[in-house]
Image (cartoon, grey):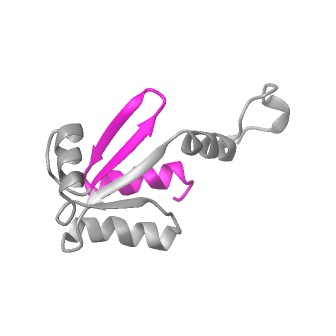
Amino acid sequence: MQSLLGMAWGAKGPAQTVAYSRAMERYQLFGYNACPFCYRVRRFLDSAGIEIQLRDTMRDRDAHAELVAGGGRSTVPCLRIEREDGVHWLYESADIIDYLGERYGIA
């Protein structure tokens, strides 16, 4: 554990770094209701109190088209991550949960 005395001026502590990185990103979750892996991610989001825009790829043709055009495949769940350096697409429910857990400081 790093003491406050050892930190440089303007340096961010772990909690500040998480909040800063999360503030620099915008998320959308692509999936559909009957998908068990999507349900797993939605259950995590609910239990963690994380609100993310959900895009239903079965009911919304534009969402499906955006997923395929941007991510390169129609597999769900998929987390669209918008950052300053561009848009990134993250597949696999466990990877999405781990990524968001890290960003929101949830172990």
Quadrant location of the N terminus in the rendered image: top right
Q: Nearer the viewer, residue 79 or 105?
A: 79
Residue 63 image position (x, y, % from top left): 24, 53
Q: Is residue 10 left or right of residue 97?
A: right
Residue 53 image position (x, y, % from top left): 41, 59
Q: Residue at x 45, y 53 (%)?
A: 100
Q: Residue at x 41, y 68 (%)?
A: 44
Q: Is residue 79 magenta?
A: yes
Q: Residue at x 16, y 52 (%)?
A: 75
Q: Is residue 76 magenta?
A: no
Residue 48 image position (x, y, % from top left): 51, 68
**Magenta span covers which residues?**
78-107
Position above or below: 15 against 12: below
* Residue 37 figure quarter: bottom left
Position above or below: 60 against 9: below
Q: Is residue 99 left or right of residue 49?
A: left
Q: Nearer the viewer, residue 57 or 104?
A: 57
